[in-house]
Image: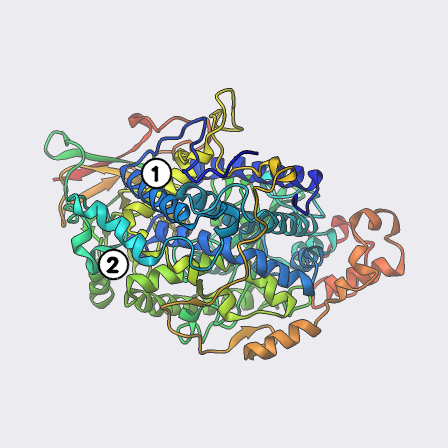
């Protein structure tokens, strides 16, 4: 019996695979080298890919039974969760596909296996991304020529107008620079030497200047068991920092959320800054410490002290871990990057996201440091796995090589019975990590997970209500005098120190404190 | 479409593993999987995701043991790996081992090169201290980082030195690129830093100068590996 999928579905899936494969090679070649003397990074990355292969399809199906991918993408755009360019845009489908590619080279699966699983993950990913990026109407940051403009005008006006000006070397600019450095370091450590806790969106044109929106994620006690206790004083899970940059052009923001500037990024070029928090239980963005320049500077200084202390305590925790614990922590950070999908849908389960499936645990003895490094290097860099080879006339995008990182689905599944549909249901998992004990820090307070889920299930942001959800900038273009447009803008202006209640008719020149 | 083939399927267009460990491991796993599959007497599609089909933890442990039995020992990247299983790994290399020859007049000698992660208006001087182990970081957390420390760091990550990094006067990182996490942190903290450093005969306590005024290398796709003349120099003073 042929597979229950159309030719068109397979064509689209293979297009998504090839796009991912192309951009991945470029990223891996030119954007960074990730290594650590503390964590066995390549080993945990390989384990995470395997867990993604065996678990993402069912988790995605369960999530979509509660909330469609398009709504999840819409919600992610209107608040701050981990559902951003790197954790979803790059990780969700790629982790699954890299797990598939690795298992194919081992002879554990074939390209014709678990076809419906692959289609499920790719379809979900695409629909989420189209909704998340609907304002710039691209699929990914890379697809947009290494740029990301997810926010609508109403949010950008608030970010710009509320941003507080600073001067070279003044207290606010200094406090911001020191906070960002400390937060970046803490986020790298909390994510076991990976960078998904540091995200960026932009650039946005702000007169003669440009604005980037910077994000620091998963800072407080939450899903990561290793933050229990050490992050008890961290008051916000996520922080959102719009920064207006003068005399600086942002030349590139890649799918790993790293941005380049010309001239190189310099804190002295920050002309104005804001600070917000948000999460999957929050309607939009809540200002933090933005009453005045001094209050904002003091807030950055206090947060910096808290994060610096947490960094020291967390480092001691990790330094006491066994290799198995470090391996689990890193693998589960990576694998669980899409977990805010489950939080947003109100069906988060710690075991789903913070255990390694029993099928994955079988592979653990393979992953000594050298094998993991080289298996990863061949998978992402050399492209020397058998299935990665194409015919001799092939010239891959970027590399010109007859190789592709991630293999397509053979169309033969439409006409033969040589295929399987799914790797099957999630099996029991385990971890060597200490159990999660602390409450979850959210914008509604510190709560047990059952209550967090219950709140999420009953929460519907105003911007997601009809008709507001579908009133976009294209509609505003010709309806900015409508009451519905005013109300839409007032939602974003709630809590704004400069634009509260101002409505939809504003242009940049009307903003009380233009920075451009 | 023909009889079910139980042998491992070869790719028409080849594919040779680039590294010996992956070649050894994957050939062993593929052979074991083929044997396991042939023994079932069933079609691939009937067994591939069956509970109980496929290799187990002990099978994968044997794959590694086969290579170790040849006398092969692995490189390590995380210190915890070699601490817990020293018998599996090569002995750690001497951290102070020179990778280039020194040139100069004996008073100011070029002892290394690196890619400048943070271009500044002035070069930077300080005292070399190797910070390459968890124990060393603990020690510096207890006693404080001596002022003027130019930390020599083996890996390009930002986590090993996280509690003390902010106190360094400069960093010489033997790995990574200016895009690596340590390079990112050097720019955020405004700590002078050279990445992918090739270092000559330098020991703890030597005074060095970093050419922090050198422009960063071009990391765009079109750029070839940074020419030596485009790399920042490291001088040993005295």
Q: Is residue A364 left or right of residue A232?
A: left
User: Residue A418 placed where, x, y %?
Assistant: 56, 41
Q: In this view, does A58 lie to the left or right of B75?
A: right
Say which chain tag 2 marks: B
Q: Which of B198 and A105 is in front in this view?
A: A105
Q: Which of marks 2 and 1 is in front?
A: 2
Question: How far is mark 2 from mark 1, CA to CA?
Answer: 30 Å
Residue linked to disc 2:
B80
Q: In this view, does A473 lie to the left or right of A366?
A: right
Q: Quadrant of the N terminus of chain A?
A: top right
Q: Is residue B98 above or below residue A340?
A: above
* Residue depicted at x 21% and y 60%: B84
Q: In this view, does A16 lie above or below B50?
A: above
User: Residue A106 placed where, x, y %?
Assistant: 40, 44
Where is residue A70, by image quadrant?
bottom right
Q: Which mark is residue A1?
A: none
Q: Nearer the viewer, residue A490 or A11?
A: A11
Where is residue B97, by image quadrant?
top left
Residue linked to disc 1:
B116
């Amino acid at each position: 019996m042929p597979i229950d999928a159309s030719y068109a579905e397979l064509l689209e899936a293979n297009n998504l695979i090839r796009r991912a494969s192309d951009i991945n090679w470029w990223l891996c070649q030119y954007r960074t080298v990730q290594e650590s003397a503390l964590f066995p990074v390549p080993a945990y990355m390989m384990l995470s890919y395997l867990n993604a292969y065996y678990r993402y399809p069912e988790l995605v199906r369960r999530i979509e039974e509660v909330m469609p991918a398009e709504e999840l993408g819409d919600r992610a755009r209107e608040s701050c969760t981990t559902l951003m360019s790197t954790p979803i845009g790059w990780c969700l489908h790629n982790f699954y596909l890299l797990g598939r590619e690795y298992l194919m080279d081992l002879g554990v699966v074939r390209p014709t296996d678990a076809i419906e699983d692959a289609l499920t993950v790719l379809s979900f990913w695409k629909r989420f991304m189209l909704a998340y990026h609907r304002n710039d109407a691209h699929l990914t940051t890379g697809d947009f020529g290494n740029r990301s403009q997810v926010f609508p005008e109403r949010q950008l006006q608030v970010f710009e107008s509320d941003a507080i000006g600073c001067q070279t070397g003044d207290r606010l600019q200094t406090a911001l620079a020191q906070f960002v450095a400390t937060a970046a370091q803490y986020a790298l450590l909390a994510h076991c030497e990976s960078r998904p806790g540091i995200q960026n969106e932009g650039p946005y044109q702000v007169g003669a200047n440009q604005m980037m929106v910077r994000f620091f994620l998963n800072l407080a006690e939450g899903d990561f068991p290793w933050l229990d206790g050490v992050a008890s004083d961290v008051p916000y899970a996520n922080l959102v920092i719009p920064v207006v940059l003068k005399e600086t052009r942002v030349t590139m923001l890649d799918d790993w959320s790293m941005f380049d500037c010309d001239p190189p990024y310099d804190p002295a070029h920050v002309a104005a800054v804001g600070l917000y928090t948000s999460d999957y239980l929050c309607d939009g963005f809540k200002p933090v410490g933005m009453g005045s320049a001094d209050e904002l500077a003091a807030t950055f200084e206090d947060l910096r002290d808290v994060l610096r202390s947490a960094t020291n305590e967390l480092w001691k925790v990790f330094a006491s871990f066994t290799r198995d614990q470090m391996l689990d922590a890193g693998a589960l950070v990576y694998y669980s990057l899409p977990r805010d999908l489950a939080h947003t849908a109100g069906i988060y389960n710690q075991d789903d996201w913070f255990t390694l499936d029993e099928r994955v645990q079988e592979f653990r003895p393979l992953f000594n440091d050298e094998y993991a490094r080289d298996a990863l290097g061949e998978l992402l860099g050399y492209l020397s796995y058998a299935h990665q080879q194409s015919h001799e006339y092939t010239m891959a995008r970027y590399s010109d090589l007859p190789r592709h990182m991630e293999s397509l689905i053979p169309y033969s599944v439409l006409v033969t019975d040589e295929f399987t549909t799914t790797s099957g249901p999630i099996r029991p998992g385990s971890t060597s990590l200490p159990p999660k004990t602390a409450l979850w820090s959210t914008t509604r307070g510190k709560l047990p997970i059952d209550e967090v889920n219950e709140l999420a299930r009953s929460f519907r942001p105003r911007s997601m209500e009809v008709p507001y959800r579908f009133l976009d900038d294209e509609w505003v273009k010709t309806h900015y005098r409508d009451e519905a447009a005013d109300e839409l803008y007032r939602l974003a202006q709630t809590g704004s120190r400069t634009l509260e209640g101002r409505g939809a008719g504003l242009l940049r020149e009307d903003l009380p404190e233009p920075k451009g | 479409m023909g009889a079910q083939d139980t042998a491992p399927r070869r790719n028409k267009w080849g594919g040779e593993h680039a590294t010996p460990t992956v070649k050894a491991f994957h050939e062993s796993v593929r052979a074991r999987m083929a044997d396991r599959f042939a023994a079932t007497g069933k079609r691939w599609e009937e067994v591939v995701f069956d509970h109980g089909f496929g290799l187990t933890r002990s099978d994968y442990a044997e794959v590694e043991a086969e290579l170790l039995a040849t006398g092969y020992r692995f490189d390590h990247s995380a210190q915890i790996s070699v601490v817990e299983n020293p018998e599996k790994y090569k002995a750690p290399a001497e951290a102070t081992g020179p990778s280039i020859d020194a040139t100069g007049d004996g008073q100011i000698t070029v002892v290394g090169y690196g890619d400048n992660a943070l271009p500044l208006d002035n070069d930077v001087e300080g005292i070399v201290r190797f910070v390459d182990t968890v124990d060393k970081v603990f020690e510096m957390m207890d006693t404080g980082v001596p002022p003027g420390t130019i930390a020599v760091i083996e890996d390009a990550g930002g986590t090993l030195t996280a509690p003390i990094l902010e106190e360094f006067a400069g960093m010489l990182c033997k790995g990574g690129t200016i895009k690596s996490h340590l390079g990112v942190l050097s720019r955020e903290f405004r700590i002078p830093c050279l990445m992918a450093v090739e270092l000559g005969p330098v020991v703890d306590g030597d005074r060095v100068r970093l050419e922090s005024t050198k422009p960063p290398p071009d990391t765009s796709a079109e750029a070839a590996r940074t020419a030596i003349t485009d790399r920042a120099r490291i001088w040993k003073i005295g």
